[in-house]
Amino acid sequence: MRRMIVAAALLAGWPAAGEVTKSEPGGFVSTHRLVIAAPPEKVWDTIARPSVWWSKDHSYSGVAASLSIDPRPGGCWCEKVAGGAIEHARVIYADRGKVLRFDGAFGPLQSGAVTGTLTFALKPEGQGTAVTVTYVVGGYHPNGLAGFAQAVDGVFAAQWPALKKAAEQGG
């Protein structure tokens, strides 16, 4: 299955290389690297606006405009839904143009005793920015965590073409 996802990504021209770099019953690590033709500050600002790049297909509301990030320590990566809201993650490290880090269990991981640390690390590269995205997940889930690794990795991988486009085109 992983080979099929990678092959599809290459055929689609996705700008990222990524994989599950570690997977075991108690957790997993997903790492992606992409290069965006925009300066680090602009990329960071775009990351902080998930409504312009996160797919509505991977939201609870089905509406990308319902997603927001308050990019300061303690700030929320939240989503408005009918009758309430969801906290996907909380900002734990914010250094504009360099690092944006979150603590949060995304999607179905929220139903377990799971923690996840999602880091966007940005570095100037040529005329653009190299972005390394790492999601480290650990804890307990009744279904085990290793079984989530490929699916979570695939959901994150699917977001990078839109992030790249939004940052490069001013989305």
Image (cartoon, rainbow, N blue to C red):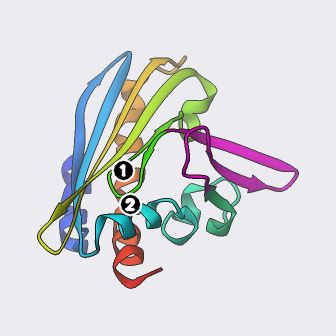
For this view, does 62 lie left or right of residue 37? right
- Quarter of the figure with residue 158: bottom left
Residue lying farthest to the left in this orientation = 126
Residue 89, x across and y down, in percent: 57, 40
Q: What predominant SS class does the magenta segment belong to?
A: strand
Residue found at x 43% / y 33%: 117
What is the span of residues highlighted in magenta in the rendered image? Answer: 69-92
For this view, does 125 lie left or right of residue 138? left
Element assignment for label 1: helix
Query: At label 2, which amino acid type do we have?
Result: Ala
Residue 110, x across and y down, in percent: 60, 31
Element assignment for label 2: helix
The label number, if any, that marks residue 154 in the structure image: 1
* C-alpha separation, residue under disc 2 versus residue under disc 1: 6 Å
Q: Is residue 9 above or below residue 145?
A: below
Q: Does any portion of residue 1 appear in the rendered image?
A: no
Residue 71 lies in the magenta-colored region: yes
- Quarter of the figure with residue 42: bottom left
Residue found at x 68% / y 53%: 79
The label number, if any, that marks residue 158 in the structure image: 2
Q: In this view, does 170 lie above or below 98?
A: below
Marks 2 and 1 close (CB-CB < 8 Å): yes
